[in-house]
Image (cartoon, helix red, strand yellow):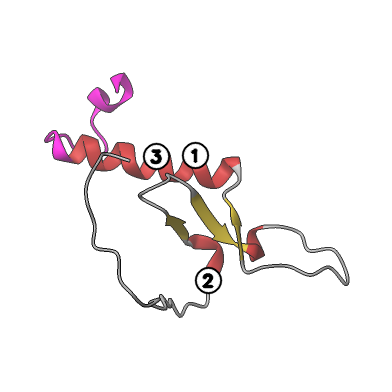
């Protein structure tokens, strides 16, 4: 998204995260900007076929924005509890 170049491998690489809390994870495709969350964030219909990940819902997107904003604030030298954050 920012024009950075990354190495494209000849073979697929499997990425695995083992967790007992899959709803807390979001995965970001830094090329396209798509954000994906685990299927357990959504109600599953009986007998439906589901893939493991879906595009993030609004709640997950808001959380990712808040996390990113917090990182920017920290980089600027503010703490998360300072009143200056509300102006960002």
Q: Residues within 10 Å of mark 1 (few under 14, many from 20)?
A: few
State the quadrant of the N terminus: top left
Q: Residue at x 32, y 23 (%)?
A: 86
Q: Looking at the image, which is closer to me, 86 or 31?
A: 31
Q: CA distance from mark 3 to mark 2?
A: 20 Å
Kindly indicate whether the residue at mark 1 contacts the one at mark 3 (C-beta within 8 angstroms). yes
Please report whichever mark, 1 or 2, sits nearer to the chain's N-terminal start: 2
Q: Residue at x 16, y 34 (%)?
A: 78
In the figure, 17 relative to 55: above or below?
below
Q: Residue at x 65, y 64 (%)?
A: 39
Mark 3, residue position:
66
Q: Residue at x 14, y 33 (%)?
A: 76
Label 1: element kind: helix
Q: Which residues are magenta?
A: 75-88
Q: Looking at the image, which is closer to me, 36 or 4?
A: 4
Please report whichever mark, 3 or 2, sits nearer to the chain's N-terminal start: 2
Mark 2, residue position:
21
Mark 1, residue position:
62
State the quadrant of the C terminus: top left
Pick out the residue farthest to the left.
Answer: 77
Among the 4 quarters of the image, the one containing residue 75? top left
Pick out the residue farthest to the top.
Answer: 87
Kindly indicate whether the residue at mark 2 contacts the one at mark 1 (C-beta within 8 angstroms). no
Based on the picture, tell me whether residue 87 belongs to the magenta stretch.
yes
């Amino acid at each position: 998204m920012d024009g950075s170049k990354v190495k494209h491998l000849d073979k697929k690489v499997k990425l695995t995260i083992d967790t007992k809390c899959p709803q807390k994870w979001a995965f970001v495709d830094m090329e396209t900007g798509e954000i994906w969350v685990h299927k357990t964030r959504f109600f599953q219909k009986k007998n439906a076929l589901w893939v493991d990940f879906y595009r993030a819902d609004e709640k997950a997107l808001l959380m990712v924005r808040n996390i990113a904003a917090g990182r920017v604030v920290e980089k600027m030298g503010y703490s998360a509890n300072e009143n200056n954050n509300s102006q960002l």
